[in-house]
C-alpha cells in the first residue's frame, strides 16, 4: 500500500524550473572579483569596454540572470509579507515578550519559512549589518 500522496504536477514543474536555475547558476563563473577590477575601467560614457572569453554556461546564466533575480526578490518579498509575527493571544508571565505565531502558517514565531529565508540570506544580511 502506497501511503505517499502523489506530487502535484504544478509543484513538480516549479521545482524542476528552480533546480534548472540553480544548476545553471552553479556552472557559471563567479564575477565578484572581476566586477571590482572592471569598475576601474568605466569610460567617460559610463561603460566598460570588455573583451573576454565567456563559456556557454556563463552566457546561459547571464541571459536570464536579471529576470531570475527579480523573480526571486519578488517571491521573497511576498513570502516575507505572508510570514510575519502576530500576537498569539496566549497568557504569558512576560508581557514585554508575548507569545508570537506566524500570521500565515500559525507556527510559533519565527516560523520554519522565515527561518529558512534568514538562513538562506544570512551571509548577505550579516554583510549589510557590518559597518563600512
Image: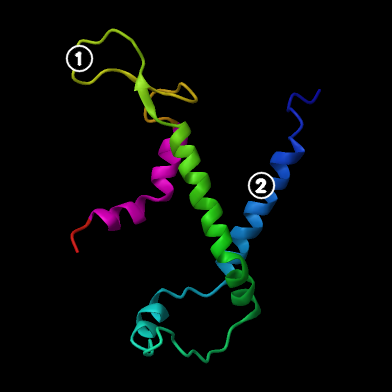
**To which quarter of the image does residue 20 belong?**
bottom right
Instruction: Report the quarter where the N terminus lies.
Output: top right
In which image quadrant can residue 108 be found? top left
Q: Is residue 27 left or right of residue 128?
A: right
Q: Which region of the structure is painted magenta?
A: 112-129
Q: Position of residue 47 (x, y in %)?
A: 43, 85
The magenta stretch spans residue 101 = no
The residue depicted at 56 percent of the width and 53 percent of the height is 71
Q: Position of residue 127 (x, y in %)?
A: 29, 58
Q: Quadrant of residue 84?
A: top left
> Looking at this view, is 2 or 57 the one in front?
57
Of the two numbered discs 1 and 2 in the rendering, the one whose residue sits closer to the viewer: 1
> Any mark on residue 17, and which?
none
122 vs 40: above or below: above
Real-space Cα separation, disc 1 to disc 2, in angstroms: 42 Å
Q: Is residue 9 above or below residue 17?
A: above
Where, quadrant-wise, is the C terminus in this rendering?
bottom left
Determine which residue is flagged by label 2: 15
- The residue under label 1 is 95
Residue drawn at point x = 48 percent, y = 25 percent: 104
The residue carrying pointer 1 sits among few (fewer than 14), some (14 to 19) or many (20 or more) residues within 10 Å by Cα, namely few
Element assignment for label 2: helix
Asked whether 7 or 64 is in front, the reply is 64
Residue 116 lies in the magenta stretch: yes
Find the residue positioned furthest to the top.
91
Q: Quick one: SS at disc 1?
A: loop
The residue carrying pointer 2 sits among few (fewer than 14), some (14 to 19) or many (20 or more) residues within 10 Å by Cα, namely few
Amino acid at each position: 500500500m502506497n501511503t505517499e500522496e502523489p506530487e502535484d504536477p504544478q509543484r513538480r514543474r516549479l521545482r524542476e524550473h528552480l533546480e534548472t536555475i540553480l544548476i545553471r547558476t552553479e556552472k557559471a563563473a563567479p564575477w565578484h572579483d572581476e566586477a571590482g577590477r572592471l569598475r576601474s575601467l568605466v569610460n567617460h560614457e559610463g561603460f566598460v569596454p570588455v573583451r573576454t572569453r565567456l563559456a556557454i554556461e556563463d552566457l546561459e546564466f547571464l541571459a536570464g540572470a536579471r529576470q531570475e533575480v527579480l523573480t526571486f526578490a519578488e517571491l521573497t518579498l511576498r513570502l516575507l509579507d505572508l510570514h510575519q509575527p502576530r500576537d498569539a493571544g496566549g497568557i504569558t508571565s512576560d508581557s514585554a515578550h508575548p507569545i508570537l505565531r506566524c500570521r500565515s502558517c500559525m507556527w510559533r514565531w519565527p516560523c520554519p519559512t522565515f527561518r529558512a529565508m534568514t538562513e538562506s540570506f544570512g551571509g548577505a544580511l550579516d554583510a549589510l549589518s557590518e559597518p563600512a
